[in-house]
């Protein structure tokens, strides 16, 4: 009686076969949790992560654009013939002759938006 071997029941065999699968599922769950914590998107979660990313990006752009003011206007004098014009930026042979101004006619001094 001491050397009798108890036959394996089908339930025990299924539990033994399912054990590695359970361990693999637990390992994958831990890895997925770690990936989420460091910000990597998983294939199943890519849509959610991208939606969060784009929501954040659009929100940040809205905040920045709401705080932005138009560029100031300046009087510019040509180094070639001395002509004075009013513009926000100039390229080439020009030097600042006055400003900043609020309007395109360079009539109201000050910064736009203030």
Image (cartoon, helix red, strand yellow):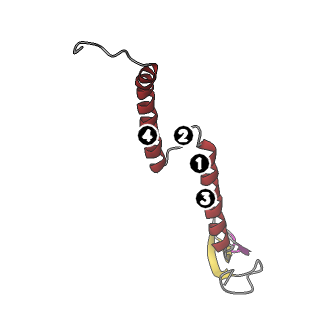
Q: Which picture quadrant has residue 98?
A: bottom right
Structural crowding at the residue carrying mark 3, measured as other residues with C-alpha within 10 Å and reported as few (<14), some (14–19) or many (≥20):
few
* Distance in Å between CA atoms under marks 1 and 2: 8 Å
The answer to whether 39 appears left or right of 58 in the picture is left
Asked if disc 3 and disc 4 are in contact, CB closer than 8 Å, the reply is no
Image height check: is 20 above or below 102?
above
The answer to whether 79 appears left or right of 21 in the picture is right
* Distance in Å between CA atoms under marks 1 and 4: 17 Å
Q: Position of residue 9 (x, y in %)?
A: 42, 19
Q: Which residue is mark 4?
A: 31
- Mark nearer the N terminus (3 vs 1): 1
Magenta stretch bounds: 81-87
The dot on residue 49 is 1
* Distance in Å between CA atoms under marks 3 and 1: 11 Å
Label 2 residue SS: loop
Asked if disc 3 and disc 1 are in contact, CB closer than 8 Å, the reply is no
Nearer to us of marks 3 and 1 is: 1
Q: Which residue is mark 3?
A: 56
- Mark nearer the N terminus (2 vs 3): 2
- Mark nearer the N terminus (1 vs 4): 4
Q: Residue furthest right?
A: 105
Nearer to us of marks 1 and 4 is: 4
The dot on residue 42 is 2
Q: Position of residue 59 (x, y in %)?
A: 64, 63
- Mark nearer the N terminus (2 vs 4): 4
Structural crowding at the residue carrying mark 4, measured as other residues with C-alpha within 10 Å and reported as few (<14), some (14–19) or many (≥20):
few
- Mark nearer the N terminus (1 vs 2): 2
**Which one is nearer the viewer's eye here, 73 or 64?**
64
Q: Which picture quadrant has residue 1?
A: top left
């Amino acid at each position: 009686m001491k050397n009798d071997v108890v036959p394996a029941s089908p339930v025990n065999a299924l539990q033994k076969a399912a054990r590695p699968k359970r361990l693999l599922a637990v390992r994958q769950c831990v890895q997925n949790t770690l990936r989420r914590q460091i910000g990597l998107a998983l294939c199943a979660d890519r849509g959610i992560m991208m939606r969060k990313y784009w929501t954040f990006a659009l929100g940040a752009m809205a905040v920045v654009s709401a705080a932005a003011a138009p560029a100031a206007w300046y009087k510019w004098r040509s180094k070639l013939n001395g002509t004075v014009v009013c513009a926000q930026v100039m390229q080439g042979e020009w030097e600042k002759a006055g400003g900043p101004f609020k309007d395109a006619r360079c009539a109201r001094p000050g910064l736009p938006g203030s």
